[in-house]
Image (cartoon, grey):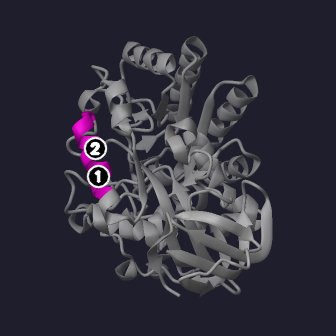
Amino acid sequence: MKILISNGRIVDPASGRDQTGDLAIAAGRIVAVGKVPADFQPNRTIDASGLVVAPGLVDLAARLREPGHEHEGMLESELNAAAAGGVTSLVCPPDTDPALDEPGLVEMLKFRARKLSLCRLFPLGALTRNLAGEVLTEMAELTEAGCVGFSQAEVAIADTLVLTRALQYAATFGYTVWLRPQDPWLGKGVAASGAIATRLGLSGVPVTAETIALHTIFELVRTTGARVHLCRLSSAAGVALVRAAKAEGLPVSADVSINSLHLTDVDIGYFNAAMRLTPPLRQQRDRDALRAGLADGTIDALVSDHMPVDEDEKNLPFAEATPGATGLELLLSLTLKWGTDSGLALPAALARITSEPVRVLGESLGSLASSAGRLIEGGVADVCVFDAEAHWAVRPGALLSQGKHTPFAFEASGFELPGRVKLTMVAGHVAHEAL
């Protein structure tokens, strides 16, 4: 099918393109950007006047809750939420039930996602069997099955010898290990250590839980040469350590959650369980450092950290509530808000959710590596069309995700978010439309 998206503001962060023009699509590929050949005869023309035409968003952290947690989220509902949020590619951690430690599980998940044709799915394989931190998985077989890297999700490896061997093996074959830096012993609290946690009587997670883990990871990277992606930094001290590691030339990258980028521990208020998140919300100085680190490139990507949580598991006392929040449908809007607050041009802000995440994934994307997160002739037609001037109130009941809990619900936050997705295309197929 041939589709023409006309008169839109075409923004491609990777190339710096920012101009009004047309986008021609045929057979799932982009055939022209800007000026379309006179002989191009579309089957459908979409008028994008006043709208932004951008690459489909790439989210490096979204839990789909299947298999094992279907009561909290089904693959179809969460991929529909991704499409509604303009996300055309996402990475899911391996902490399903059972964990993604067998090739058959990975192949099944990818097959089901392909059948839905709503969003590209890139699973992370479990670094250790059942995420137990003891025996390494068959990384080569998991890679052949479609894994783009290996992770422990939220389960830190307590045995440094096991982590060393995992990084040695990964370095030998060029695999990337995705780690959330948190010490397994210091990270058992439910809120960030500080005045708020003390006043509320909540067990705290100190900044040292992150920095000790980072120091360990960086020492092992120096020893093994393994490439590591650091998931969801949460502290100013952590940002400073990553900045120094990059300046040293270590092969590391990092991301931050939309929650940590916009919220602080003050937002916990009077035990608001919607603010029970992992990593925990820290102080304003940490949030400001995260924002600055994302703006200057120390932090490579912004992620939704999407994690649907069942109603019964969220409506509990703060310390007992399951951490997590829905985020796929909010990623674009919260990126635009951060970009505006930081004084960034639209292409620079969009880069953190398009071209930069693709750079993190690198060659693990295979044939998509050269065109995902971009709008280029001959490239894959993953496209997000949105109204940058529109504002909307987050009403949990209207979200497509099966998980309805979000810290940014209008009833709690009282503010509207910028940017509304109008059309999402995956390989030239319309996955979501609200024109």
Rendered location of residue 298, percent (x, y): 70, 41
The Cα atoms of the two marked residues, 2 and 1, are separated by: 6 Å
At x 39%, y 77%, the residue is 399
The amino acid type found where label 1 is placed reads Phe
Q: How many marks?
A: 2
Is residue 341 something that shows in the picture?
no
At x 71%, y 77%, the residue is 22
Residue placed most toward the observer, 42 or 124: 42
Residue position for label 2: 107
The vertical placement of 20 against 26, above or below, is below
Is residue 157 something that shows in the picture?
yes
Chain part drawn in magenta = 101-113
At x 42%, y 32%, the residue is 186
Magenta stretch prevailing secondary structure: helix
Q: Is disc 2 in contact with disc 1, using a CB cutoff of under 8 Å? A: yes
Rendered location of residue 67, percent (x, y): 22, 51
- In magenta stretch: residue 194: no
Dot 2 alpha-carbon crowd within 10 angstroms: few under 14, some 14 to 19, many 20 or more:
some
The amino acid type found where label 2 is placed reads Glu
Q: Secondary structure at mark 2?
A: helix
Left-right relation of 405 to 236: left
Rendered location of residue 424, percent (x, y): 51, 72
Left-right relation of 322 to 183: left
The vertical placement of 281 against 224, above or below, is below
Residue position for label 1: 111
Rendered location of residue 430, percent (x, y): 46, 74
Residue placed most toward the observer, 218 or 197: 218
The vertical placement of 125 against 212, above or below, is below
The quadrant where residue 337 appears: bottom right
- In magenta stretch: residue 102: yes
